[in-house]
Amino acid sequence: MRRLILAFFALVALAAPAAAQQPRSLDDFSHPGLWRAEASDGVSGTKRPFEGGLRLDYDFTRGSGYAFLRRELPLELPDNFELRFRLRGGGPANALEIKLTDSSGENVWWHRKADYVAPGQWQTIRVRRRQIEFAWGPTQDRTLRSAAAIEFVVAAGSGGGRGWIAVDDLEIVPLPEPPAVPPPIVARSDGGRGAAAAADGDRATYWTAPPGAAVDLDLGYLREFGGIVLRWGTQAFAADYDVSLSIDGHDWRPALALRGGDGDVDWLRMAESEARYIRIRPLRARSGLVSLGEIEVRPLAFGASDNAFIAAAAAETPRGIFPRGFAGEQNYWTLVATPAGGQSGVIDEDGAIEVGRGGFSVEPMIRADGNDWWWPDAASVQSLRDGDLPIPTVEWRGPGWRLAITAIAEPDRLVARYRLRNEAATRRTLRLMLAVRPFQVNPPQQFLATTGGVSPIRALAWRDGVLAVNGIERVRADRPPDTVRLYAFDRGPIGGAEVAIEDDRGLAYAWLGFTIALGPGEEREIALSLGLDGAALPIAPGEAARSEDAAAARWRTALGDVRIAGPAVARPALDTLRTALAHILATREGPALRPGSRSYARAWIRDGAMMSTALLRMGLSEPAIDFLEYYAPFQYPDGKVPCCVDARGADPVPEHDSHGELIHLVAQLHRYAPDDARAERMWPRVRAAADHIEHLRQSTRIPANRRGRNRPFHGLLPPSISHEGYSDRPAYSYWDDFWALTGLKDAAWLASDLGRAREARLLEARAAAFRSDILASLAAAQEVNRIGFIPGAADRGDFDATSTTIALSPAGEQHNLPPGALLATFERYWAEFVARRDGDRPWDAYTPYEWRNVGAFVRLGWRERAAEAFDFFMADRRPAPWNQWAEVVGREPRTPRFIGDMPHGWVASDYINALLDMFAYERSRDGALILAAGIPDHWLAGDGISVARLRTPYGLLSYTARAEGNRLRMSYRLEGRPPPGGLVLGLGGERRLAGLSGETEMILPPPGPTAATAQSGAPIR
Ligand SMILES: [Ca+2]
Ligand SMILES: [Ca+2]
Ligand SMILES: [Ca+2]
């Protein structure tokens, strides 16, 4: 039987290496007229013939964006192929994209080289079919079978600026498919014994040979692979060896030279390798002979990235040796930054600290009673300083000992405190081991803007008590460690008073060891000073405690003077209010409000406008003013407001919510922190954005949109991808329209306040006309899509209540919306919410932007429902004591996924705005300020709630409310001017409050069906 199988494999092997097929020319670029050059707004892109090819000159000077060469090129694509072209260019590192578009024009496949520096001389570039991925488009079938057009695109990367590329000789080469069943690998050697055992699939059988002999693997066909794994015999391993590759078994090329290996398992990453033969030649043995148990050939994925490589190694290593993020489990972390934001660290639930965005990390390990305690062994408990300040601590609890790890941000460095306590009744000696490792805390599946995972360390040096990482003295301790060991990946330790190593794989690491003798109950602290961007400042014993106190004082000052208090049951919610506020500040970069510090390290006007509202309500106007002053100048001359900006400038992708958001930001500042000079200075921008909105909305008021299925589009803003859910195809998103309507209304109000009566009338008229078009569109969209709720987009008829909340706040259109449709929308959201909460409906993940629905519930008068939704979302803080949400919350906490930033600043603002709505919101119908409409009954127990100096558009609001039995006692004071609709108590029915201050009593209705539920988060397992 065995013989038969081998014979079958032999046939396959003979059939597989079919003769390489001939290249077919697709374009020799002798007709430049077939190509057109284009660029996004604010970017220039021009073409010209160049050395027989075609050249694209681009200039990003005014922002980010892209430029491209494109031609129509109908192509039927074989099952496997390679695209080849010649390329040269000049300029900074930017993304090079080769895009193929199908005949619909909507489905795009691409090969993307991020931060690519084009070669100065002509070079042949090969792109294999497997390297061309589906990029976006509505198709369900993402297999690339044919193309209608091809583009060469330069998209702004880290370099931006100006530059050029030239392309020539575009060819396609059909390739054979790899055999479905790979032939067996055969090993031969020119010395030693038992060569076949090196590839027999049995790790316990060995090829044994003296150094100098070589073993060759024959893979059976020309094969692509990503690396190999060698498994050596105990003690009998090669410390030095070479790996070389061959296509034909005669000509060999060196692939890898390993020196100073540590035996056991050697993980060898060999990205994008292709060979039929692999040769291992041991040059030096640890002692005597070498014995090699197995050479394992790994697929391309193994070498695809540092992250894939480490994950593969972690998968075969005991849990704990690698961080949780590499061990196939989702980890959770929080931000460590100052109130001024900027460069930051993060710490994860297991106590690993990341030093700077994308930086290396420091991980603890405890050696006690002959055991090593890694993160899986220690029961970790997280906390924040005083329960609310973003100074996080992770405590490891071992038998008879505690290790508290606290991370503190100073402007240029992190201070890490490691407090080790002996809880045993006897004196004992413990060892604190701190590893400096080439891993971010931000895990490998994080891909946006900052790729998480490996943070290469190519060089480590220990000298004068300081550890230099990649040549910069980043790590200092407040006392000298008693041992220091430096390692290159897979290689043995190097120690001593002054040592240095290099690791060309970028995977070097260090251990700093501290031996600590502790009497019963005694505690000792080791502190590190960690340089965020540059060298770490010295740190003296005792300094870390002072640093923590100073950081706490800084935060208390930064969080302002709004005070909201409540009973113990409300404490997690109120602590989270202050933590969320702190996170908005901490996530900033200079004046830029950003949703995140890593994945979302850019400023969006969308997020920034809503974060500004949260800041203003909490009395922090300065950061909102700074943000407006920073962002407004990015407005384009035609009044268009870019959706997003970063250090490279504005992003030109049209997202039509942005214009209304900028106006709203100006208006909110004028409501909460009035300054006529600023408003006058901003007025031309407000007017230009309002005119741009008018221009956009007129563009769809065309005869074609008066009929049939197009009726819902009439008078709406054109389709855009502002909504994350519509990135596959631009949509007529009501989110954009309600933001634009907000902008027109705010512009009219601002004009009136600035005494521009004529402009105010014009803008009011535009807002009214736009509102009536939107309402007509809503009715038509319901009819066309046969739905009873308010859809997310007019063309999709989709359900998206979280986006519909914008119509209530900030648009203030609750009283203008068709009541039946409004109710149907949030009743459906409620029903789906309950089904999800109670486990009656499968779900995988959600975005906690859903906090906005809590604010909507309050406005709808659904106090009990608001409380239930509140409890559900509160329970998804991860870990709960850190008072934060990522952008994505998975149902299974340990299933790895992209979760965005943690904390996510925009979500933090949604939480703040929802919670503050529960205490006080402005009703759109009559301009009344509604107090306590969302306060759950159980928050009124004991001393009840008290609010002091909460900012409203009418002044500073303070009140107390508590229940005695069924009697509610309340006192209130508004320091400012009367709201148009007065002050109204919204708790259990409505009561108009007299004047701007006073006291009142009322009988509460019997409690609703919802009683107090646990506020603490579910434990993460
Ligand atoms: Ca040519
Ligand atoms: Ca073997
Ligand atoms: Ca090894």
Image: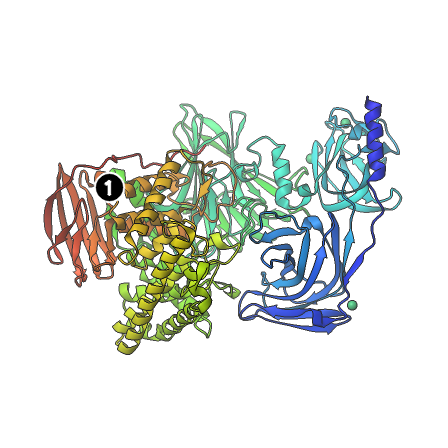
Visual colour scheme = rainbow
> Residue sitting at 64 percent across and 36 percent down?
313
- Dividing the image into 4 quarters, which one contains the C terminus? top left
Q: Residue 482: image x %, image y %? A: 55, 37
- Dividing the image into 4 quarters, which one contains the N terminus? top right
Q: Is residue 44 above or below residue 139?
A: below
Residue bearing the label numbered 1: 936
Q: Quadrant of ligand 3?
A: top right
Can residue 788 be seen in the rendering of this structure? yes
Q: Residue 949: image x %, image y %? A: 22, 55
Q: Residue 230: image x %, image y %? A: 73, 34
Can residue 216 be seen in the rendering of this structure? no
Q: Is residue 127 above or below residue 753?
A: above
Left or right position of 674 against 109: left
Q: Amino acid at mark 1?
A: Pro
Q: Is residue 360 above or below residue 764?
A: above
Q: Closer to the camera, 355 or 115?
A: 115
> Residue sitting at 49 percent across and 28 percent down?
429
Q: Closer to the camera, 843 or 239?
A: 843
Left or right position of 778 against 457: left
